[in-house]
Amino acid sequence: VWLGWKAFGPSELDGDPIATTLVAFEEQNRLTVFSAQLSPVVASEDSRLFGALKSRQVAVIPARVDYSIDLSRIEARRLNWDAASETLTVQLPPVRVAVPNLDEGRAQYLREGVWITGDAQAKLTRANTRLAEQQAMEAAANPVLMKLAQEAARTAVRQNLAIPLHVAGFGDVKVN
């Protein structure tokens, strides 16, 4: 059986590294490549009874922001195989920043005011939540964090492709 397999079985030359790569991504949609923990500090003010009751709320709301790439956008035209150098070049889709996930359970609030009504407190909390989400999105778009996320995406895709290609019999393939 072994001699028959060696003589007539599939060889490493029969495979297609691009098809193997596409199969590796077939079932995946989005790959989270990086996460950042942020803590926006926001403040809101409220005034009631013609300015007689003024209140202010400062909040520190922890937020987690995920960075991902859409693997379903990686098609054959984004892949290039160089058989001579055994190198697969992949053109990655852009890294996307997800909507921040605010952890309001761990939020810390500082309220100022002589008397803060329940409605005023609810209004201040809603305003601070909106501000914290906006600040977290702006901070997540920071060029330093985006560069870290892009490098993490390259590393993740390199690892996700090198192993299936090695298992498929292409040896130690270089992925760029």
Image (tube, rainbow, N blue to C red):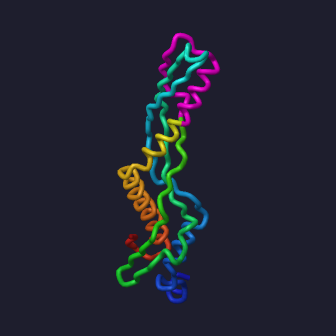
Q: Which quadrant: the C terminus?
A: bottom left
As drawn, 34 above or below 127:
below
- Taking the magenta stretch, the answer to whether it contains residue 97 is no
Q: For residue 126, what is the image quadrant?
A: top right
* Residue located 50% across and 56% down the image: 96
* Residue located 48% across and 75% down the image: 79
Q: What x and y, as percent, mark residue 43?
A: 47, 28
Q: What x and y, as percent, mark residue 19?
A: 54, 77
Q: What x and y, as percent, mark residue 68?
A: 50, 55
* Residue located 55% across and 73% down the image: 75
Q: Which residues are magenta?
A: 103-130
Of 174 and 77, the residue lying toward us = 77
For the image, the number of numbered tags is: 0
Classify residue 22 as left or right of residue 119. Answer: left
- Taking the magenta stretch, the answer to whether it contains residue 108 is yes
Q: Which quadrant: the N terminus?
A: bottom right
Q: What x and y, as percent, mark residue 106?
A: 51, 28
Of 39 and 9, the residue lying toward us = 39
Please identify the residue farthest to the front as the structure is shown: 50
Please identify the residue farthest to the top as the structure is shown: 114
